Amino acid sequence: MKILIITPSYKPAFVYGGPIFSVAYLAENLLKHNEVFVLSTNANGKENLTIDTLHPLQMDGVNIRFFKRQTKDHSHLSIGMLRYLWKHGGEYQVIHIQSWWNTVAVLTALICKIKSWKYIISPRGMLSPYTIEHSIVKKIIHNLIGNYLLKNAIIHVTSNDEKQKLDKLNPRYTLIDVPNYVDVNSKSQNVIRSENSDIFNLLFLSRIHPKKGLEDLFSALSKVGFNYHLSIVGDGDSNYIEELKLLSRKLMIENSISWKGALYNDDKIRSYANADVFILPSKDENFANTVLESLAQGTAVIVSKNVGLSDFVSDNNLGWVYDSSVNNLEEVLNESKTSPQKLKNIRETSTSIIESNFSEANISNRYIAMYNTSLNSH
């Protein structure tokens, strides 16, 4: 099958967090049994990647063409990419658009509609009632053209939670649920977690953004009845990070927090393995690769009910899910500290549960089934 993946950004633009890894894992795994080509801009946050934008490249086996973008921020307008798509898009059986709310995704969908090409959209957490309600600009775009383009596509969601949110947004959408590919096979060889330590090691690993709920986590931690250390791994807006540091000082918890910046590869895996509990208090999260990455290292998780994988965590007893209130978060934090047997059970069982539910072969079959559905749709 010939698959064209179109994305506003691609690795090594890790500044964009989880979606960068999700799209790369998708391309690299599909490549094993399909012909895959990726189109991306040279976006890298406020800057641009220093990379060849004139010729196709190969990255970890994936053929990719980067294009210059004419606008930055989150619009990512790239006239060269759109021109290439207009000329060559019809050569592919599947056009798979990544993200939403940018000119790459929206204008690609518009071109596909004009050309009568079938297309699939993976919003990557960028399409939900939460995102539309928190932006008047997005609400206008959605009503003017976005909803029309989305109704004419297959929308790929990565969890039942995301599926329910989009169904509420518009019950006429065609939704297919296929989880992300996640690297669950890498194992840390240097685990230094201490079973008898008086300090409970907590980990937050994600993009640092207001929707991630760190304010709630800080408030809950200021009330818990045990000694802890919270490692915060990730990048974000420097002004917002300073606001969080000020909040930690006001709550008198700053001495219990380490700001690690972004970590990758072995350093990231080691941070999961050495934590007692991983915490993701997001207010809106369509999937959360980090939850599976943590569980693959045997580390239990605490997640809000707004995290896409919260049902999976509950159903398999792999940690704690709270109702998004600070008081309930405080309760589950205290409960996790006083549940050494549950933490031990999760360390012994979570890896096999993740591998059986999110195996590469299983996920690949589901992606191909989705692509065939698109090919056979009217």
Image (cartoon, helix red, strand yellow):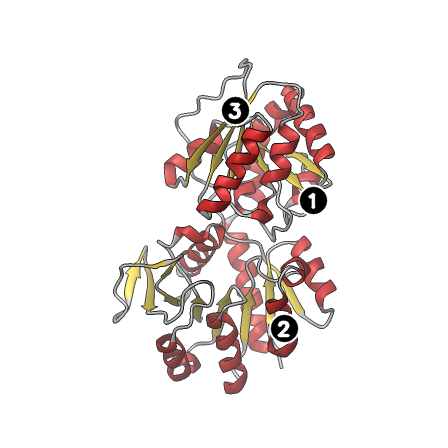
Label 3 sits on residue: 256
* Picture layout, residue 143 above or below residue 263: below
User: Which numbered dot is residue 140?
Assistant: 2
Q: Determine crowd level at label 1: few under 14, some 14-19, many 20+ residues with C-alpha closer than 10 A.
A: many
Q: Position of residue 339 (x, y in %)?
A: 66, 21
Q: Position of residue 369 (x, y in %)?
A: 57, 65
Q: Which of 34 and 233 is in front in this view?
A: 233
Q: What residue type is labelled 3?
A: Ser
Label 1 sits on residue: 305
* Picture layout, residue 175 above or below residue 28: below
Distance (Cα) linking label 2 and label 3 = 43 Å
Q: In the image, 173: left or right of 123?
A: right
Q: Position of residue 135 (x, y in %)?
A: 62, 63
2 vs 1, front mark = 2
Q: Dividing the image into 4 quarters, which one contains the C terminus?
A: bottom right
- Mark 3, secondary structure of its residue: helix
